[in-house]
Image (cartoon, rainbow, N blue to C red):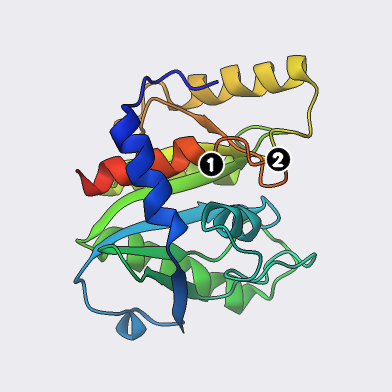
């Protein structure tokens, strides 16, 4: 259950924002490939296999916008999705923490992610996806450190919240809140989501709507 009392108007704005289509526009392997900084951007970051593509698809009400795969590390570029009705762009970032990817590829992704996070003036918030079965791992904390250092606002989203038992999930929530408690760029509210059951999607849509204002 949400800890925030959202206004009905903002909830409806979030619903409408994602009731209208988002389209894939391009995949970027270099910073120079990125579109102009002409609209609000939000980015989704997370470990490989955290369910990032599934969450983006569920958020946007489709099964095919972001490519999902059983193979971790499938997203190897910054994938750009744009709203057809709002001044909003979604950036799907390469998954991190997948050891089997070639080292040169990992270095290239890491550099690309760093350049994007530290140099994008229109980036309003990064949603850091953390597996709800496990809580923050070392490489999740490393990304949070980078976001804190770059003063980029971020919010933790726990995925796969339907998987663990209630007591296990409560432990993960407590550990996650403790991990972000003193982080300067972290939003204090953690969002629980399940792409399978639709849990947390209304809350996430509303948070994004609030970023764009009324």
How far is mark 1 from mark 2, CA to CA?
9 Å
Asked if 58 appears above or below 171 in the picture, the reply is below
Mark 1 burial class by Cα count in 10 Å: few <14, some 14-19, many 20+: many
Image-based side of 38 in relation to 58, left or right: left
Name the residue nearer the viewer: 142 or 93.
Answer: 93
Question: Residue at point 45% right, 18% down?
Answer: 3
Residue 36: which quarter of the image?
bottom left
Question: Which image quarter is the N terminus in?
Answer: top right
Residue 118: which quarter of the image?
bottom left
Residue 197: give its label. Answer: 2
Q: Position of residue 146 (x, y in %)?
A: 38, 48
**In this orientation, does residue 154 appear?**
no
Q: Is mark 1 on a helix, strand or loop?
A: helix
Q: Position of residue 34 (x, y in %)?
A: 33, 79
Residue 116: which quarter of the image?
bottom left
Q: Is mark 2 on a helix, strand or loop?
A: loop
Residue 158: give its label. Answer: none
Question: Residue at point 27% right, 49% down?
Answer: 150
Name the residue nearer the viewer: 79 or 198.
Answer: 198
**Residue annotated with mark 1:** 201
């Amino acid at each position: 259950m949400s800890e925030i009392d959202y206004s009905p108007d903002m909830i409806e704005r979030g619903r409408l924002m994602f009731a209208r289509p988002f389209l894939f526009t391009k995949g970027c392997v270099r910073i120079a490939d990125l579109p102009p900084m002409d609209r609000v951007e939000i980015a989704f970051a997370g470990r490989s296999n955290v369910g990032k593509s599934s969450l983006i698809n569920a958020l946007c009400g489709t099964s095919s916008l972001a490519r999902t795969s059983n193979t971790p590390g499938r997203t190897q570029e910054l994938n750009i999705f744009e709203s057809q009705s709002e001044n909003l762009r979604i950036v799907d970032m390469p998954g991190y923490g997948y050891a089997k990817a070639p080292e040169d590829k990992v270095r290239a992704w890491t550099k690309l992610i760093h350049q994007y996070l530290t140099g994008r003036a229109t980036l309003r918030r990064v949603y850091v996806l953390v597996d709800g079965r496990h809580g923050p791992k070392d490489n999740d904390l490393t990304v949070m450190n980078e976001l804190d250092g770059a003063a980029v606002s971020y919010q933790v989203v726990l995925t796969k919240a339907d998987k663990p038992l209630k007591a296990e999930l409560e432990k993960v929530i407590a550990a996650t809140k403790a991990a972000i408690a003193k982080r300067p760029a972290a939003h204090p509210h953690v969002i629980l989501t399940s792409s399978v059951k639709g849990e947390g999607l209304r809350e996430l849509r509303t948070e994004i709507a609030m970023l764009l204002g009324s």
